[in-house]
Image (cartoon, rainbow, N blue to C red):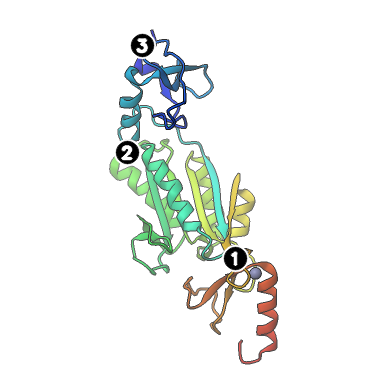
């Protein structure tokens, strides 16, 4: 008999039938139809066994969804993921989505952003459509490792426990962030980094190019070009401000595709009053 403790639920399989004509196999461990799958050895590689709702599928699923009480939370593996793209492309939204999924899995999540970014709140990472998650502000990347060491010391947490570490607006941090990300991944932490790949002149931005090189996963997200409606890869500043440390806001920036960006740059260069 297959016991509840030996079952790993496949969360991707729908729990409840959505179409009346859909049919399900008979569960080998119950009387009802099998509407999900589980494995005997608790891994995703084992042989899948159909399971009915009555054999612990729903209670176990609901328990697994409670943050912090998941008895079989997945083991974090050291890795570096980069989410990048132009302004208004949904980088922070994607970062928050991945961090929330980690929280749902019962993992310890820590989030950092440069102190400089206080657009929506000093202690939260907030996307342009106001989705937010609490964070710690830093002015140097070394503070990330200092913070983790301090927290492990204060809470007597096992230093070997892998954390999920989110870093937003990483283009504004220093070049030491590359060393910090590599160190954290060696210590078995999953490092998620979001930031602009290019500045308003189309040049590689801060530590982002090197972070993209050392990451095993790079996701480039796209905005929509405000001129032609194609996918946008560049952030164009349509005001005469010069510093790269001007944060994204619609009054200063607009997303453009490469041809529209090149056209806008040529126009700006031929207009002596612009720069
Ligand atoms: Zn365009």
In this view, which residue lies farthest toward the bottom? 273
The location of residue 191, given as percent across then percent down, is 49, 47
Which of 239/168 is in front? 239
Q: Earlier in the sequence, mark 2 or mark 3?
A: 3
Mark 3 residue CB less than 8 A from any atom of ligand 1: no
Helix, strand or loop at label 1? It is: loop
| Residue holding disc 1 | 205
| Residue holding disc 2 | 67
Mark 2 residue CB less than 8 A from any atom of ligand 1: no
- What is the crowding at mark 2: few (fewer than 14 residues within 10 Å), some, or many (at least 20)? some
Q: CA distance from mark 1 to mark 2?
A: 36 Å
Q: Quadrant of residue 143?
A: bottom left
Q: Which mark is residue 31?
A: 3
Image quarter for ligand 1 equals: bottom right
The location of residue 223, given as percent across then percent down, is 56, 62
Marks 1, 2: nearer the viewer: 2
The location of residue 144, given as percent across then percent down, is 43, 53
Q: Judge from the rendering whether residue 97 lies leftward or rightward of residue 217; answer left or right.
A: left
Residue 85 against residue 108 in the figure, above or below = below
Q: CB of mark 2 within 8 Å of CB of mark 3?
A: no
Marks 3, 1: nearer the viewer: 3
* Residue 261 showing in the rendered view: yes
Q: CA distance from mark 2 to mark 3?
A: 31 Å
């Amino acid at each position: 008999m297959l016991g509840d403790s030996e079952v790993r639920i496949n969360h991707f399989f729908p729990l409840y039938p959505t179409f009346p004509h859909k049919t399900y196999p008979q569960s080998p461990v119950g009387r009802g139809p099998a509407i999900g799958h589980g494995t005997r050895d608790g891994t995703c590689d084992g042989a899948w066994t159909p399971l009915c709702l009555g054999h612990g599928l729903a209670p176990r699923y609901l328990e697994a969804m409670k943050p912090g009480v998941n008895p079989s939370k997945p083991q974090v593996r050291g890795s570096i993921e980069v989410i990048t793209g132009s302004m208004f492309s949904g980088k922070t939204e994607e970062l928050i989505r991945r961090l929330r999924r980690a929280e749902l899995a019962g993992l310890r999540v820590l989030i950092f952003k440069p102190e400089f970014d206080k657009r929506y709140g000093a202690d939260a990472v907030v996307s342009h459509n106001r989705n937010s998650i609490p964070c710690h502000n830093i002015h140097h990347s070394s503070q990330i490792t200092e913070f983790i060491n301090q927290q492990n010391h204060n809470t007597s947490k096992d230093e070997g426990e892998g954390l999920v570490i989110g870093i937003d607006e990483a283009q504004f941090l220093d070049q030491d962030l590359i060393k910090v990300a590599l160190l954290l991944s060696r210590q078995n932490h999953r490092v998620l980094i979001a930031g602009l790949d290019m500045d308003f002149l189309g040049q590689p931005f801060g530590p982002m190019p090197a972070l993209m090189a050392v990451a095993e996963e790079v996701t480039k997200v796209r905005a929509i070009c405000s001129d032609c409606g194609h996918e946008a890869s560049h952030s164009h500043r349509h005001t005469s401000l010069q510093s790269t440390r001007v944060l994204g806001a619609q009054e200063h920036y607009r997303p453009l595709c490469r041809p529209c960006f090149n056209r806008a740059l040529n126009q700006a260069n031929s207009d002596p009053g612009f720069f």
